[in-house]
């Protein structure tokens, strides 16, 4: 057991003082902005809520080709007051002008059949090009402190807004200037600018041979700037991984899905000696109309050839068919397609082991000195990591294993009886292959320890056992599993998809039969998603909606030909997931150092939001609230039905969400700020109402701040105040006003913004092999009222090799096939005890009947909610896990539109292809 863990995170070193750098700063002239925007808006004939200037592409062009440019500012195209770019030296006009002219020429429509409009486009383009020479932007010198921060009212250090994009670029530049020596091999890195921070990619890629094929991969380092609630200094998070490159012949792009391309291009100015230090982000996608790959809208591949006539750049089809050649480079130009799991298996496994993570982290630590220092190590703050699980410890004793199996079946049956409330359990197995049908029946029998039975002629199984009445019916899916036929017939794509989904759902509902008093459960066998020509032709949404209309929650399992892993294992997981959707899943008894109140209930809130690019092509949103009372004998898991204003069983909530389709999301032509304000107002109204509904007993509110803060801005780190809740436009209100026994714990995970840092457990001695460790942690020497904790769990069964010292980036001679191993990238879960009955809360409420809470004990209770007998450790506590999974039932559909033609319906009676086709 490791006593400490290290975050791969850094903070400004107060012993060094400010980190000041001199920059040349340029602003985007207002004259340019007005004229270029007018030119760009010629692409649209209507003038309502037109998009802003697409300066992102210009910024990428500058970073790729202008030596000395360190970073580009955000929102510079919207306001001339925002710095456009930061450089280490003045950029001469003869360098900037060609770049700007190339970008400006791409703004107007490429073609217009109307001669008058085409002439107008050309005339305004000439005016815009002339303006580049007429208006020269001014340079100014500015000294910027890269450690500058303000402290919020709640005590959280917030960096200067510019540092979110400027500091990662400077840190990345410092690191890329130093080679990394691993196993005697020198790795050098290139910078890649991201929406959030910077990536460092080792270049050129390394190779590994497996299955008589050469696979390409690189080391990956990601740098971002983050804040931590109530921390006196902001953080620089650094994460590590493997960047794998796609080199198939050809790379098989999926319909509707793009792929990222990193370009290594020479500077187009022959007289510069500046070495290459960047890779440029581009994208390539399969155009459905052309049936061929095309460059993405933000790509530079069609702009760079106009600036650089000395080099040849690949066409999209060339890159996808000759990916390995272009990755190695041709004539000084190289380009690599990032591997995606949709492309199939890669010979190099994902992730890094703790040893290489530690070695990379030491390299980073040396590179950021003396300006930044490592954040303090974390120590355990609670002795017991796990709740009282049935499988509490490892054993091979047959008697103990048999006893555990008996207790597990007993717990399962008890959980199901609690959600059935005396009703029979009706389940359906809707199959495409007989082997999956039989395996699901077997898995259900084993899960509940039901006696075996011969397959009945009518496909209906019945069991009466230990107070349970189970009725299982099997039936073939037939044509209901085929791709949706989405016709366009004069309607929008969303309307056509909605018609096809509704038609298929009606057929599914009719096949399953009428609703019963008790909610049923259907396991449905489906084809893999690659079988369908477009995402919105996948019938999964229609099948789920049809099951819901028939009063069944649904769980899917993929046909064996399209799935990985043993069928028996997948069937057992499908059974457990199906029971979870019935609500037969409650937290195990906790195992804390000190007791919490016995009647504690959990309230989890999750905001679901689907965009127009989803499978139904229709946006929608909904606030999901779950209440779990572990000791309730009937329906311990309930969700809030906003229409009925009541707590309903979890399974019924899922069916209600499917039927409602969620709240419409305002379309693009609406005012975004007004829409966001309306969303916030409605969400906060619901949250206040929910807190009122649960104030009758001790409640622990769980919320993922990264998920919820868009509609509840008071959860942003800079808005947080201890033992208070903040609602939009209001002063912080003490937590006791919303419930005398209310506690609030916020969670954050890494998400796509790297908000929580990676970690590893160092050995006791410098040369000891690092590893991973389960537990609840806080900074060494933290005060008793410390509110921020780190929850870690062990490696899941799918986490790959158990060897923590295996090297992948530069494998050792003893383990030459190290790159093939799959490793687990450990993500910490941050727990912030925002509100509790601290020393001052009972005093403020004038209470003498309550001892103060220990924040660490509340955090430990939430940490233990990540463990359950039916699951491997969860990525979030069980109440939030169940709330988030409810988003699978939000299926927004466009309003039905009147038919404009007599085209045939989107459905037919054609049978689905067999899984082997």
Image (cartoon, rainbow, N blue to C red):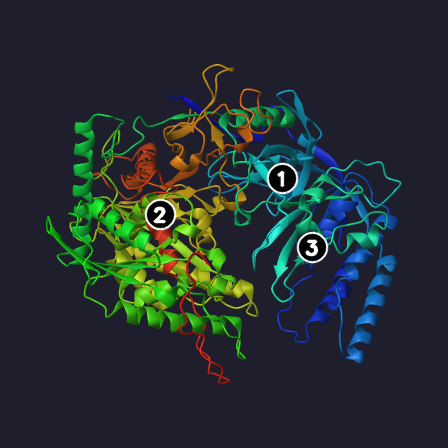
Pick whichever of labels 2 and 1 is earlier in the sequence.
1
Residue at mark 2: 881
Which mark is on residue 199?
Answer: 1
765 or 534: nearer the viewer: 534
Which numbered disc flags the more N-terminal residue, 3 or 2?
Answer: 3
Judge whether residue 657 can be spotted in this image: yes
Mark 3 or mark 1, earlier in chain:
1
As helix, strand or loop, the secondary structure at mark 3 comes to helix
Which one is in front in this view, the residue at disc 3 or the one at disc 1?
A: 3
Q: Is residue 657 above or below residue 830?
A: below
Please give left or right for residue 48 compared with residue 586 in the image.
right
Q: Nearer the viewer, residue 752 or 381?
A: 752
Mark 3 surroundings within 10 Å by alpha-carbon count, few (fewer than 14), some (14 through 19), many (20 or more) = some
Q: Which residue is mark 3?
A: 317
For image coordinates 68% across by 76% down, the residue present is: 45
The quadrant where residue 422 appears = bottom left
Q: CA distance from mark 3 to mark 2?
A: 42 Å
């Amino acid at each position: 057991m490791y006593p400490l863990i290290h975050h791969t995170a850094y903070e400004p070193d107060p012993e060094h003082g400010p980190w000041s750098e001199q920059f040349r700063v340029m602003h985007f002239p207002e004259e340019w902005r007005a004229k270029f925007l007018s030119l760009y808006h010629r692409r649209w004939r209507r003038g309502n809520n037109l998009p802003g200037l697409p300066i992102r592409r210009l910024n990428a062009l500058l970073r790729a080709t202008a030596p000395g440019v360190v970073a580009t500012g955000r929102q510079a195209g919207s306001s001339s007051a925002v710095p456009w770019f930061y450089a280490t030296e003045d950029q001469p006009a003869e360098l900037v002008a060609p770049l700007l002219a190339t970008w400006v020429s791409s703004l107007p429509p490429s073609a217009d059949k109307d001669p008058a409009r085409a002439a107008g486009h050309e005339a305004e383009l000439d005016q815009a090009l002339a303006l580049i020479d007429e208006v020269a932007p001014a340079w100014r010198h500015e000294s910027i402190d890269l450690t500058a921060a303000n402290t919020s009212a709640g005590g959280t250090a917030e960096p200067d807004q510019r540092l979110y994009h400027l500091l990662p670029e400077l840190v990345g530049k410092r690191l890329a200037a130093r080679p990394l020596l691993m196993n005697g091999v020198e790795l050098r890195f290139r910078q890649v600018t991201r929406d959030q921070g910077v990536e460092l990619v080792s270049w050129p890629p390394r190779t590994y041979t497996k299955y008589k094929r050469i696979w390409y991969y690189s080391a990956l380092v990601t740098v971002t700037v983050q804040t931590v609630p109530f921390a006196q200094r902001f953080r620089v998070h650094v994460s590590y991984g493997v960047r794998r490159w796609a080199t198939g012949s050809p790379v098989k792009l999926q319909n509707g899905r793009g792929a990222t391309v990193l370009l290594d291009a020479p500077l187009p100015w022959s007289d510069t000696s500046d070495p290459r230090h960047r890779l440029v982000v581009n994208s390539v996608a399969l155009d459905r109309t052309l049936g061929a790959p095309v460059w993405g809208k933000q790509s530079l591949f069609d702009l760079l050839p106009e600036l650089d006539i000395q080099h040849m750049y690949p066409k999209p089809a060339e890159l996808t068919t000759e990916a390995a050649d272009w990755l190695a480079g041709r004539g000084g130009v190289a380009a690599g397609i990032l591997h995606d799991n949709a492309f199939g298996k890669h010979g190099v496994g994902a992730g890094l082991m703790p040893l290489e993570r530690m070695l990379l982290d030491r390299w980073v630590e040396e590179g950021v000195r003396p300006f930044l220092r490592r954040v303090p190590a974390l120590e355990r703050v609670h002795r017991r990591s796990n709740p009282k699980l049935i499988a509490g410890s490892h054993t091979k004793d047959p008697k103990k294993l048999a006893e555990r199996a008996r207790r597990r079946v007993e717990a399962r049956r008890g959980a199901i009886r609690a959600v059935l409330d005396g009703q029979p359990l009706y389940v359906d197995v809707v199959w495409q292959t007989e082997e999956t049908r039989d395996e699901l029946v077997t898995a259900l029998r084993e899960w509940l320890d039901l006696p075996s039975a011969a397959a009945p002629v009518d496909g209906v199984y019945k069991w009466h056992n230990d107070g349970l009445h189970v009725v299982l019916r099997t039936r073939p899916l037939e044509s209901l599993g085929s791709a949706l036929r989405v016709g366009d017939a004069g309607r929008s794509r969303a309307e056509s998809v909605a018609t096809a989904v509704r038609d298929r759902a009606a057929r599914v509902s009719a096949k399953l039969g009428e609703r019963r008093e008790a909610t049923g459960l259907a396991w449905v066998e489906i084809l893999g998603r690659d079988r369908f020509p477009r995402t919105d032709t996948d019938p999964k949404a229609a099948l789920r909606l049809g099951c819901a209309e028939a009063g069944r929650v649904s769980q899917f399992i993929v046909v064996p030909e399209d799935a990985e892993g043993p069928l028996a294992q997948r069937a057992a997981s499908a059974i457990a997931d199906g029971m979870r959707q019935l609500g037969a899943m409650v937290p195990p008894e906790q195992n804390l150092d000190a007791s919490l109140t016995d009647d504690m209930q959990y309230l989890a809130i999750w905001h679901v939001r689907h965009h127009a690019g989803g499978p139904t092509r229709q946006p929608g949103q909904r606030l999901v609230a779950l209440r779990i009372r572990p000791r309730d004998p009937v329906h311990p898991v309930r969700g809030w039905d906003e229409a009925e204003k009541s707590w309903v069983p979890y399974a019924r909530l899922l069916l209600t969400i499917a039927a409602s389709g969620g709240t419409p999301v305002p379309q693009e032509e609406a005012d975004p700020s007004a829409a966001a304000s309306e969303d916030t107002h409605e969400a906060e109204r619901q949250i206040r109402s929910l807190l009122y509904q649960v104030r009758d007993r001790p409640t622990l509110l769980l919320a993922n701040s990264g998920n919820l803060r868009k509609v509840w801005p008071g959860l942003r780190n800079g808005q947080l105040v201890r033992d208070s809740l903040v609602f939009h436009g209001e002063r912080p209100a003490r937590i006791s006003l919303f419930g005398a026994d209310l506690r609030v714990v916020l969670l954050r995970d890494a998400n796509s913004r790297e908000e929580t840092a990676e970690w590893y457990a160092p050995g006791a001695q410098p040369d000891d092999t690092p590893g991973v460790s389960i537990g609840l942690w806080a900074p060494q020497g933290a005060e008793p009222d410390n509110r921020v904790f780190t929850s870690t769990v062990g490696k899941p069964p799918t986490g790959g090799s158990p060897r923590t010292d295996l090297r992948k980036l530069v494998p050792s001679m003893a383990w030459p096939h190290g790159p093939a191993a799959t490793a687990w990238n450990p993500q910490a879960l941050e727990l912030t005890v925002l509100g509790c009955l601290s020393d001052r809360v009972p005093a403020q409420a004038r209470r003498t009947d309550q001892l103060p809470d220990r924040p660490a004990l509340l955090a430990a209770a939430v940490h233990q909610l990540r463990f359950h007998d039916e699951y491997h450790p969860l990525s979030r506590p069980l109440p939030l896990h169940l709330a988030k999974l409810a988003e699978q039932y939000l299926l927004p559909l466009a309003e039905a539109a009147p038919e404009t033609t007599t085209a045939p319906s989107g459905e037919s009676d054609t049978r689905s292809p067999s899984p082997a086709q």
